Image: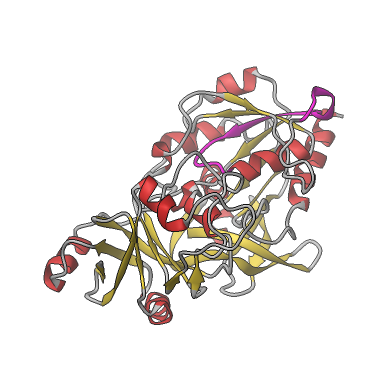
Amino acid sequence: MKATLALADGRIFEGKSFGATGEAFGEVVFNTALTGYQEVLTDPSYKGQMVTMTYPQIGNTGINPEDVESARLYLSGFIVKEYLDFPSNWRATMSLDGYLKENGIVGIQGLDTRALTRHLRDKGAQNGIISTTDHDHDSLVGKARAVPSMAGLDLASGVTCEKPYHWSEKLWDLERGYTEAVPAELTYKVVAYDFGIKLNILRCLVSAGCDVTVVPATFPAEEALAMNPDGVFLSNGPGDPEPMIEVVENLRKFVGKKPIFGICLGHQLLGLALGGKTVKLKFGNHGSNLPVMDLATRKVEITAQNHGFSVDIDSLAGVCCLAHENLNDQTVEGLRHCELPIFSVQHHPEASPGPHDSHYLFGRFVEMMEKGKS
């Protein structure tokens, strides 16, 4: 079946449908990861976006129940060069096409994703529409232009959990799969704010020795402090952090009282809570092969990333120091409070998909909590 992708600036790409049929709207971005499309599909940070995979062949590893990063799919649409409908993977339990159909996600294949990626890189990420029912170019462009801009959207409220819950599952083991931590292994009590949290973040925290309680995005700081945690964690998530005014005000109540570690949206919200500003990037950083320098050690890490906004480090002068820097575009990849036990990173140290170069950051959080306890 024919499918058409139209961008808000009038650029049209034609291809073939796979996954669900119908129409899908969202901000069109590109992801440079070579593999791990299942984790991309289930990352809540992609809510409101249509993801273009730059790797040309997608679908060859199929889908399996162990590699999901959340309970469902959150992205709006999926764009690939060549879909492979014959997975070759002993862990696969279904095809990508079947998975998208089951979850109502519209996909398009057969278009020139190199041309699309270069267009987004030059013109910037923008809204678009994928349709299998309407192929009139003027009509589609009009619909794409009517989609609300990602800037100004609070999307985290639509992906956060409804009530607190406890998490005790550790990282995946080649021989045993996922295992549960025993109480004796969990030394540090952590309250984790869910703005769209990935499951592998929770597993990394538990494997580092954390007893994790996950709470909704608007969970009152007073109630979290009443749990007497050793530290507070702020998760990844979708959308623009600036509209989340009540969340930012709530997070300010932890400053100076508990060690804080933030990732991605949590990093941006922390920057706002400390008095800083954020900016919308031209096309963002999405992938699992992006170089970052830890300025404390001067070591370069290859990281997983998924964000369209960045903290303005100059707006935090005298409060925070630049801790990590993106070596591709020199944007802020991490900040550290000048005096308090607070730090955050823009990239994803839990990876999934991606390299494990930044796993040490969970250990850094634990060291910070240990110092706080002693």
Q: Is residue 164 above or below residue 292?
A: above
Quarter of the image where one finds residue 281 = bottom left
Q: Is residue 108 above or below residue 168?
A: below
- The tally of labels here is 0
The span picked out in magenta is 181-198
- The one nearer the camera, 181 or 365, is 181
Residue 225 among those drawn in magenta:
no
Residue 309 visible in this rendered orientation of the protein: no
In the rendered image, residue 189 lying in the magenta stretch gets the answer yes
Asked whether, in this view, residue 161 is left or right of residue 167, the answer is left
- On screen, 251 above or below 334? above
Q: Quadrant of the N terminus?
A: bottom left
State the residue lying farthest toward the right: 374
Name the residue at 52% across, 45% down: 269
Question: How far across and how far down the image is residue 273, in percent?
Answer: 53, 42
Q: Nearer the viewer, residue 259 or 1?
A: 1
Location of the C terminus by quadrant is top right
Report the side of 372 relative to 49 (left or right).
right
